[in-house]
Image (cartoon, helix red, strand yellow):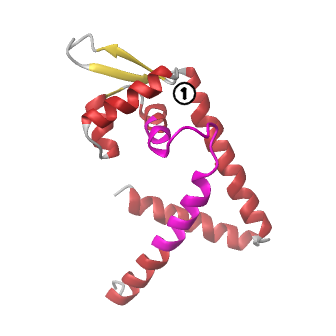
Amino acid sequence: MSASDEALRLTATDLRLATFRLARRLRCARAVDAMSDAQLAVLATLRMHGVRTITALAEGERVTAPSMTSMINGLEEQGYVRRTTDEADRRRVLVEITDAGTEIVAQTIQRRDDLLAEMLAELDFSDEDLATLRAASALMRKVVER
């Protein structure tokens, strides 16, 4: 049995509002205040998936290659990424995260997890409530990863 169109719309609205507000609160917690969300997203992608081309990064972040090149220039100047030439195709430039970039991502994740844990603690959720939230987060990941 499938959910009704009305139930789907109401759920979509509720999820959109809640995730937008939560994301906005979490984005405030970062290891480097001057770093943009887009730059953090690129570093997180490199940390999770390893070396990437500028084109692949641009496609993943849904920006133009020149915009990504500009972003990579800034990250490289700060020591968070480095460029290398692809040995198989010397025309391609590969981007990899540095130890400093990895540390920025790890610190930002830790700060955001700490903030969310504090927010949850303030509401004094029961173990059952927390289990429900974990189950909901698994369902949300399923939606995003499709």
Residue 4 percent across, percent down from the top left: 34, 88
Q: Quadrant of residue 127?
A: bottom right
In the rendered structure, does residue 36 fall within the stretch colored magenta? yes
Q: Indicate the quadrant containing the N terminus: top left, top right, bottom left or bottom right.
A: bottom left
Location of residue 55 with respect to 118 vertically, above or below: above
Give the residue at x 75% y 71%: 125
Q: Indicate the quadrant containing the C terminus: top left, top right, bottom left or bottom right.
A: bottom left
Q: Nearer the viewer, residue 31 or 44?
A: 31
Residue 23 percent across, percent down from the top left: 54, 59
Residue 133 percent across, percent down from the top left: 61, 68
What amino acid type is highlighted by mark number 1?
Gly
Magenta stretch, overall SS: helix
Tell whether 60 sits left or right of 107.
left
Which residue range is magenta in the image?
A: 16-42
Q: Nearer the viewer, residue 84 or 32?
A: 32
List the residue tagged with mark 1. 101
How packed is label 1: few (under 14 Cα within 10 Å), some, or many (20 or more)?
Answer: many
* Element type at mark 1: helix
Location of residue 92 with respect to 75 vertically, above or below: above
Q: Quadrant of residue 130?
A: bottom right
Q: Nearer the viewer, residue 61 or 68?
A: 68
